[in-house]
Image (cartoon, helix red, strand yellow):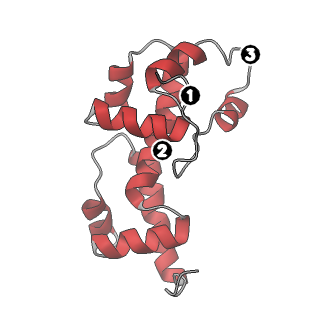
Amino acid sequence: MSSRPAPSLSELVRLRRVRDRIDREYARPLDVEALARGVDMSAGHLSRRFRLAYGEPPYAYLMTRRVERAMALLRRGDLSVTEVCFEVGCQSLGTFSTRFTELVGMPPSVYRKQAVGGSDGVPPCLAKQVTRPVRNREAPVVGVP
């Protein structure tokens, strides 16, 4: 249990603005310092309070959004893993692949091979729910030598 007090209503509004910005601008270059400046907080304070409110720090939340979008693009099958990496705003293929594997449980290349055409006929809203990545490194790693 945290000894820090829960965020106030005004602070929750500011944290929600950060979360909404991440949801909207996940493919743009975003860093915690810029997000914090946008709501008049220090980067450290934003990270601590965001984690308290949403269960993970802003950078982890951003990477989860990027992985979710990457999963959808990989299911389409018309882009390479590298193209998907840059399309969702990641600058490093290694970091993208590592975080993708942590959240999904398999590398993006394996996911792409298994997922292409696998959701044909499934409504997009249902496919998104079923394929949502697991947060906080809970996914078991499969298909990795």
Q: Nearer the viewer, residue 138 or 81?
A: 138
- Identify the residue at horizontal 38%, vertical 20% (top origin): 81
Q: Does residue 55 appear to the left or right of 98 in the view shown? A: right
Which amino acid type is marked by label 2? Arg
Instruction: Tell me the residue at 31%/68% (across/down).
Output: 36
Q: Are marks 1 and 2 in contact (CB under 8 Å)?
A: no
Q: Where does label 3 land, which residue? A: 121
Return the residue found at the far front: 145
Residue 50 seen in this snapshot: yes
Q: Secondary structure at mark 1?
A: loop
Residue 105: image quadrant is top right
**Residue linked to disc 1:** 142
Q: CA distance from mark 3 to mark 2?
A: 24 Å
Q: Earlier in the sequence, mark 1 or mark 3?
A: 3
Tags 1 and 3 in contact by the CB under 8 Å rule? no
Q: What residue type is disc 1 on?
A: Val
User: Residue 39, labelled with which disc?
Assistant: none
Left or right, residue 78 beside residue 134:
left
Residue at horizontal 51%, vertical 81%? 7
Image height of 30 relative to 15, above or below: above
Quick check: 73 above or below 52? above
> Closer to the observer: label 1 or label 3?
1
Task: Name the residue located 58 percent from the left edge and 47 percent from the top edge.
Answer: 138
The span from disc 1 to disc 3 (Cα, nearest Å) is: 26 Å
In the rendered image, residue 86, in percent from the top left (x then y), is placed at 31, 29
Residue under label 2: 65
Circle nearer the N terminus (3, 2): 2
Q: Quadrant of residue 78?
A: top left
Query: Looking at the image, can residue 88 be seen?
Result: no
